[in-house]
Image: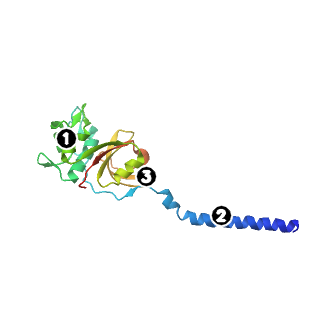
Amino acid sequence: KNQEHIHIDTEMKATLALFITLGLFAHASAFLPFLMFEGETCEPREYSYFSQCDTRWKNNIMAGTETICEVGCLMSSVSMVLNTFNIELNGQDSNPGVLNKWLQANHGYADGDLYVWAAIEQFGFSYQGKLTDIDAIKEAVCDESKIVILNVMHGHHWVLARGVEGETFTINDPGFNKTTYTSSDIVQAGVYSHLEF
């Protein structure tokens, strides 16, 4: 072959390789959405909702000197769980006001306003501890026997997890008008197990 033929063959091979590469990319790109959103996904559960600043209890003092509206996000999240399961406290349906009084009378607070996670175990909720690994948190959220309460806002706030899709968690937020947080917002999670969900 002369130099001209060699040059043409080289160009054809390069062009053919380009088409093959583009073809493979086109096929691969069809799967990119699935690859990008791979991970735990589960439909949001239905939980009762309460605001910690509801006028019925927002000024109620907890175990220290602060009010439910000021620092009752975790306790209010727990009250949503108890209400969803139709747990009555002293003959009343659970809400932040009712649960706060019950915790005060049943050693449910420690060191002031700190909620004692094991306080509600007598109602069938077994405290499993805290998780910090985001994949483990997602798995717990999607486990129907688990109840997960997420610690967000750099550790200053607690919300009740309902579901997860990719990196987005659907939540009940007792303190703010929000329905979702992302994985990057989550510091840790407290987990209960309950077999009758």
Image quarter where the C terminus lies is: bottom left
Left or right position of 136 against 73 = right
Nearest to the eye among marks 3 and 2: give it.
Answer: 2
Measure how far apart labels 2 and 1 are at the Cα level. Answer: 64 Å
Q: What element does badge 1 sit on?
A: helix
The residue wearing badge 2 is 21
Q: Quadrant of residue 184?
A: top left
Give the mark, 3 or 2, whose residue is nearer the N terminus.
2
Q: Which mark is residue 135?
A: none
Q: Is residue 86 left or right of residue 5?
A: left
Q: Please tell me the numbered disc located at residue 100.
A: 1
Nearer-the-camera pick, 8 or 113: 8
Identify residue type, mark 2.
Thr
Decide: is 86 above or below 64. Answer: below
Q: Earlier in the sequence, mark 2 or mark 1?
A: 2
Question: x%, y% of residue 155?
Answer: 37, 39
Seen in the picture, residue 151 relative to 63 is either above or below; the reply is below
